[in-house]
Image: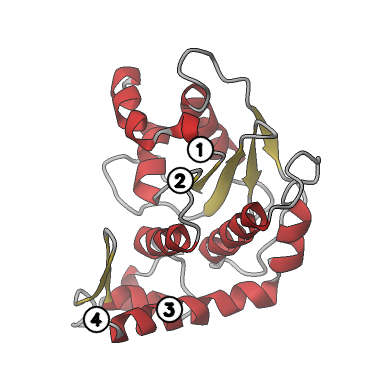
């Protein structure tokens, strides 16, 4: 579901309202959050940047949508190596990627579904959370295959496995997939920061199921809106 038609009639849609870290938000992003619309790259990148500020440990990395998209679609292996190196993936204990089903590298924000791929080093596994019955599994596996060779120590190949979380919280409409990504990312970061046992098989799954519900996800819109407004007021 796209937002273009809804926003065409707003002459101020392109107005910049907030610059946060490296993310610029516009009035059109507020309009998306105010209504039942599909989240764009900018909103997810903003929220990931905010979570990074809340959990500033160097061992946690929340990858911006544009970076995750390029890793998944980079046509040249050598270019990918140079691109991934600055992320310092071997130093991270938790890495969270947003996954989009857009396959057209020439068209930005052309996808129609978001999901989340998270790497946890202690368990040495990539877990895919999809709020719509795993329909992004193919795209998530593409991202996993592209990045798995760079996640381990530089002198050894990674043996990290891939897991599709079959009981991940499910959306109840056709437009909240991006909100599920933000809510699940928030729950995973909170779990990692809590000091809970990282060796058990359960990992963050129970935390995600408890914290990510249709009602809590619906509240994420107003939560992100309020966050943006409070940051705007501090300018």
> Residue at coordinates 48% horizontally, 50% vertically from top-left?
57
**Nearer to the camera, 41 or 234:** 234
Question: What is the x, y in percent for residue 137?
Answer: 61, 40
**Nearer to the camera, 102 or 72:** 72
Q: Is residue 79 above or below residue 232?
A: above
> Residue at coordinates 34% horizontally, 26% vertically from top-left?
80
Whole-Å distance between the Cαs marked 4 and 2? 27 Å
Q: Is residue 170 above or below residue 192?
A: below
Res. 43 in view: yes
Whole-Å distance between the Cαs marked 2 and 1? 7 Å
Q: Which residue is mark 4?
A: 235
Q: Which residue is mark 1?
A: 92
Crowding at mark 3 (Cα within 10 Å: few <14, some 14-19, many 20+):
some
Crowding at mark 2 (Cα within 10 Å: few <14, some 14-19, many 20+):
few
Whole-Å distance between the Cαs marked 3 and 1? 27 Å
Res. 75 in view: no
Q: Which residue is mark 2?
A: 58
- Splitting the image into 4 quarters, where does residue 132 fall? bottom right
Query: What kind of element bears circle 3?
Result: helix
> Residue at coordinates 56% horizontally, 51% vertically from top-left?
115
Q: How is the image coloured?
A: secondary structure
Whole-Å distance between the Cαs marked 2 and 3? 24 Å
Q: Is residue 20 above or below residue 68?
A: below
Q: Which residue is mark 3?
A: 227
């Amino acid at each position: 579901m796209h937002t273009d038609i809804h926003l065409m009639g707003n002459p101020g849609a392109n107005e910049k309202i907030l610059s946060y870290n490296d993310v610029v938000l516009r009035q059109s992003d507020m309009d998306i959050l105010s209504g039942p619309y599909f989240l764009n790259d900018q909103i997810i990148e903003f929220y990931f940047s905010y979570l990074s500020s809340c959990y500033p440990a160097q061992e946690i990395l929340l990858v911006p949508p544009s970076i995750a998209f390029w890793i998944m679609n980079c046509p040249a292996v050598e270019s990918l190596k140079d691109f991934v190196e600055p992320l310092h993936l071997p130093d991270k204990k938790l890495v969270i990627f947003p996954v989009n089903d857009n396959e057209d590298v020439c068209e930005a924000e052309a996808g129609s579904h978001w999901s989340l791929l998270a790497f946890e080093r202690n368990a040495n596994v990539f877990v895919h959370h999809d709020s719509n019955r795993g329909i992004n599994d193919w795209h998530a596996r593409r991202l996993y295959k592209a990045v798995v060779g760079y996640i381990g120590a530089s002198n050894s190949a990674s043996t990290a496995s891939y897991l599709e979380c079959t009981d991940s919280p499910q959306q109840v409409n056709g437009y909240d997939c991006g909100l599920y990504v933000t809510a699940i990312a928030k729950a995973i970061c909170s779990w990692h920061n809590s000091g809970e046992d990282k060796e058990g098989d359960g990992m963050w799954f129970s935390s995600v199921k408890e914290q990510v519900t249709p009602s809590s996800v619906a509240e994420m819109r107003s939560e992100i809106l309020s966050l943006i407004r409070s940051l705007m007021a501090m300018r």
